[in-house]
Image (cartoon, coloured by chain):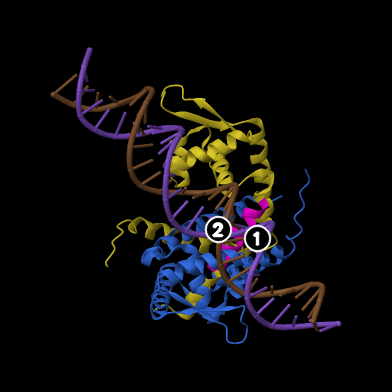
Chain colours: A yellow, B blue, C brown, D purple
DNA sequence: GCACATAGTGAGCATGCATCACGATATCCG
DNA sequence: CGGATATCGTGATGCATGCTCACTATGTGC
C-alpha cells in the first residue's frame, strides 16, 4: 500500500541513520572512547551523578552491561564510583575532571555537527525540516509504545 | 558557533536514529535473523547473486566477516553458495526460495514502516521534509569523503 | 613461467550485550 | 521485631559482530 515516494523517503532516512552512526562513532572514537561509553557519558551529563540502575534504564541496556561500561570508564579515569549516601546497595557514578573535560569537548563537537547539517540552510527549509523531523519522531514514539506485545506466530 | 535551534534539530535527528535503529532491529529480529544478516539479505536483493567480496564492500565490513554472515545464513537456509562460473576462487551467494520469501516479507514490512512515518502527511510538508532529508544526507556524504585521514596526535 | 594481486577461510582477539545465579541491602507487612 | 520479597551491583557464561594476521587456491600481467 505504501507509496513509492514514501519508500524513497524511508530510504533517505535509513541512509541518514547509517551515515550518522558511522560519522558520530568515528569522531568520538578518539580519546579511547567507544560508542557505548560515549553514550553513557552523554547520559551522565544530562542526569548528573546517577546510580548504575538509572544509567541502565537510560541507555536501554541491562544493568550488567553498565557494570562493564563503568568499569572501562573508571579505568581510563573519566568517571568515579562513590557509595550512595542513603542506599548502601547502590553506587553513584560521577565525572572526574577529565571526564567533565571530555564531555565539554563532545558538546563542542556536537555543535560542529549541527553546523555541518544545518548551517546556512534557508530559514524556511530549516523550519519545515525541523517540523517534519518532529512529526516522524512523534509517530515512531507513539508506535513504539504499542510494539511491546511480542507475539510470535509460528 | 552553532545555533541552539540547530542543536535542537540535531537532537531530533539523533533521537530518530535511536528509535529507528531499535524499531527496525526488533521487527527484523523475527525469523531468526540478526541485524547484520538482515542487511546482507537486503544487499543481495539489490545486487542479485554476488561474490562475498562484493558483499563485503557493500556492507562496509571485512571479507572475513562476510564469511561468518554467509555461514549463518546458509545454515538457516536463506542463501546458498555456488561456485563462480568463471572465477574459481570466488563464490556466488544467492537466495534460496526461503531467502527470497523472507526478503519479500521484509519489503512488505518496509512498506508498512514508510506508511507509519509518512502516511497521510500533507503534501507540502512531505515534499519539504523529503528535500531537507536529501540535503542533510548530501552534506553528510560530502563530509564523510574528507574524514579519511585518521591522524592520532598522542 | 614467475611475481604479484585477489577470493575466501582458520585462528585468535575485543567489544557490546544478554541471561542466570548470587550476595548484600532495603522495604514491606504481619 | 522478623521473615518474605524486591532491588542493586556483579561473577560467570554465551552469542553476535567485527577486526587482523597468516594461509591456500586461484587469476593476471609482464
Q: Which disc is residue A117 wearing?
A: 1
The numbered mark 2 sits on a residue in which chain?
B
* Residue drawn where x is 35% and y is 55% of the image: A145
Q: Secondary structure at mark 1?
A: helix
Q: Which disc is residue A27 wearing?
A: none
The furthest residue to the bottom: B85
Is residue A50 positioned above or below A113 on the image? above
Q: Is residue A120 left or right of residue A38?
A: right
Q: Main secondary structure of the magenta part?
A: helix
Quadrant into which the N terminus of chain A falls: bottom left
Q: Contact, CB < 8 Å: mark 2 with mark 1?
A: yes
Q: Nearer the viewer, residue B137 or B88?
A: B88
Q: Are marks 2 and 1 on the same chain?
A: no
Q: Which picture quadrant has residue B53?
A: bottom right
Q: Is residue B120 left or right of residue C6?
A: left
Q: Is residue D7 left or right of residue B132?
A: left
Q: Is residue B87 magenta?
A: no
Is residue B46 positioned above or below A141 on the image? below
Q: Nearer the viewer, residue B131 or D6?
A: D6
Residue B146 makes an appearance in the image? yes
- Number of numbered tags placed on the structure image: 2
Q: Is residue A26 magenta?
A: yes
Q: Where does the image place residue A44, in percent across and percent down from the top left? A: 54, 38
* Residue drawn where x is 54% and y is 37% of the image: A70
Q: Secondary structure at mark 2?
A: helix
The numbered mark 1 sits on a residue in which chain?
A
Q: Where does the image place residue A12, in percent across and percent down from the top left? A: 55, 70
- Residue named by callout 2: B13
**Range of residues picked out in magenta:** A13-27
Local packing at callout 2 (Cα closer than 10 Å; few below 14, some 14-19, many 20+) is many
Q: CA distance from mark 2 to mark 1?
A: 10 Å
Q: Where does the image place residue A117, in percent across and percent down from the top left? A: 65, 60
Amino acid at each position: 500500500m505504501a507509496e513509492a515516494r514514501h519508500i524513497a523517503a524511508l530510504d533517505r532516512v535509513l541512509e541518514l541513520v547509517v551515515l550518522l552512526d558511522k560519522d558520530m562513532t568515528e569522531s568520538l572514537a578518539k580519546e579511547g572512547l567507544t560508542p557505548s561509553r560515549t553514550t553513557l557519558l552523554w547520559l551522565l551529563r544530562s542526569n548528573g551523578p546517577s546510580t548504575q540502575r538509572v544509567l541502565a534504564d537510560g541507555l536501554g541496556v541491562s544493568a550488567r552491561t553498565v557494570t562493564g561500561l563503568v568499569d572501562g570508564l573508571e579505568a581510563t579515569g573519566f568517571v568515579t564510583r562513590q557509595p550512595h549516601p542513603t542506599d548502601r546497595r547502590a553506587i553513584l557514578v560521577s565525572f572526574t575532571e577529565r571526564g567533565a573535560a571530555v564531555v565539554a569537548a563532545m558538546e563542542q563537537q556536537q555543535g560542529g555537527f549541527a553546523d555541518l547539517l544545518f548551517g546556512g540552510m534557508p530559514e524556511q527549509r530549516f523550519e519545515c525540516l525541523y517540523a517534519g523531523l518532529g512529526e516522524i519522531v512523534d509517530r515512531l514514539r507513539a508506535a513504539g509504545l504499542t510494539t511491546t506485545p511480542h507475539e510470535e506466530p509460528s
